[in-house]
Image (cartoon, helix red, strand yellow):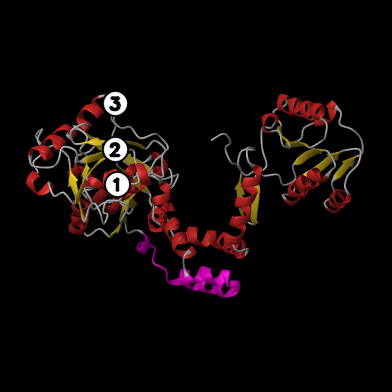
Amino acid sequence: MQYLPLFHQLQDQPCLIVGGGDVATRKARLLLQAGAQLTVIAPDCTVELHELLNQYQGTHLARRFLSDDIGVFRLVIACTNDTATNEQISQLAQQRSILVNVVDSPSLSTVIFPAIIDRSPLVIALTSGGTAPVLARLLRGKLETLIPAAYGKLAALAGRFRPQIKAAFPTVRQRRVFWEQFFSSNTAELVLAGKEQDAENQLQQQLQTINPDHFKQGEVYLVGGGPGDPDLLTFRALRLMQQADVVLYDRLVAPAILELTRRDAERIYVGKARSNHALPQAQINELLVSLAQEGKRVLRLKGGDPFIFGRGGEEIDRLAEAGIPFQVVPGITAASGCACYAGIPLTHRDYAQSVRFITGHRKYDKLDLDWQSLCVTNETLVFYMGLMGLAEICQQLIQHGRDPQTPIALVQQGTTEKQQVFTGTLMTMPDLIAQHTIKPPTLIIVGNVVKLHKQLSWYQPQPTITPK
């Protein structure tokens, strides 16, 4: 991040604006609403700015800025039409470690103003870091339509009941679970419907009969993170990702997806690479049980789909045995996501009437597959975890009757900005990959549908590589 977003307490704090035009008026309105003690230095001010200063008992010095004016202000804003004056103000403020904002000059500023959605006490700030302020304003407009003004009343109600909730629930985790359930409840809906007093009465009644032990129960969320693009997550997956207290994640989970989990959640890496398992599967199963028994909400985050070569079935089998509540959220499996982003339909009326998902993981350095059954011409084959055994896959398919000229594609880091597609045939692909460094995760697609890649490819962050 270029900027760390912070909310600054300016109540009764001295702040300075140098400039008296429309921009200065907008900045003054924000500072005065935040309770600042405002001084404005400018030969002239707009009528509205004069009225604001009178209303909030601010000060107007009707003259040009002097170097001695910088004083002991908490925040200084420069919005004059004189570049030299703005630069001088920035330099003087930074010498005294005073926060300074020079309007439309991020390089001269130590703080910048975001686009603000005000639902006080709920306040949302949005910024592009000064690179695209119009885009930030457009997004602000969209958020304004999505967040009713009554959310401010809902936040205020929660604030009034915080002491009672803290007294009723001894742990932070219990209080967090209570509030998450409350904000999704009918009681909260009453506030949004304008029935604030009814909501307050209902909440008060609930507190008299609530059982804190109800909020001690742990749970496991088995969530498919998809092939890599965060936009492919389901709404339910994202909601549960934001609720979890601890996250157990795999090697194939994209960093951008992991960042969507709760910021304060504990993260535990349990990924598996070839001959290098952070934790054996049996230990992962037991860890899920023990964490849930501690009363934690545990997110088991997997790449792709949990039930397609993700060993999710083994994990929930152990959870069920231990009596741990769990939920399973499917994800877009790598075969579907990578094929779509590579422009390769897995089935097609003219090329393939069926598709088969196969694990290409080598056990004891050998692929033990029914190769004869994999040589159906009008069937697409998708190999997961097959990169290390690619040469053997091509050799065995040819040996058991598949045409050596059958198209094959490798989709590396599919659906992400680093996606790269390698195309060839069963005969040429082993030589092709020998000339390139191909990294997992890479999906292998075999079949005549690969012929459509060149025609249908729509997502190409990196070029396709084909044999010369």
104 left or right of 320?
A: right
Amino acid beneath label 3? His
Rendered residue at 76%/37% (across/down)? 77
383 left or right of 114?
A: left
- Give residue 26's position: percent from left, percent from top: 77, 48
Contact flag, marks 1 and 2 (Cβ < 8 Å): yes
Above or below residue 290? Residue 128 is: above
Q: Main secondary structure of the magenta part?
A: helix
- Give the labeled residue for mark 2: 441
- The foreground one among 119 and 20 is 20
The quadrant holding residue 159 is bottom right
- The foreground one among 171 and 132 is 132
**Tag nearer the camera, 1 or 3:** 3
Could you classify mark 1 by the number of other residues whose Cα lies within 10 Å: few (under 14), some (14-19), or many (20 or more)? many
Residue 287 visible to the viewer: no
Q: Residue 334, which numbered label?
A: 1
- The foreground one among 188 and 146 is 146
Amino acid beneath label 1? Ala
**Tag nearer the camera, 3 or 2:** 3
Decide which of tag 3 and tag 2 comes sooner along the chain. Answer: 3
Rendered residue at 28%/44% (across/down)? 451
Could you classify mark 2 by the number of other residues whose Cα lies within 10 Å: few (under 14), some (14-19), or many (20 or more)? some
Rendered residue at 88%/47% (across/down)? 46
Label 2 secondary element: loop
Q: CA–CA distance between discs 3 and 2?
A: 15 Å
Rendered residue at 65%/48% (across/down)? 115
Label 1 secondary element: helix
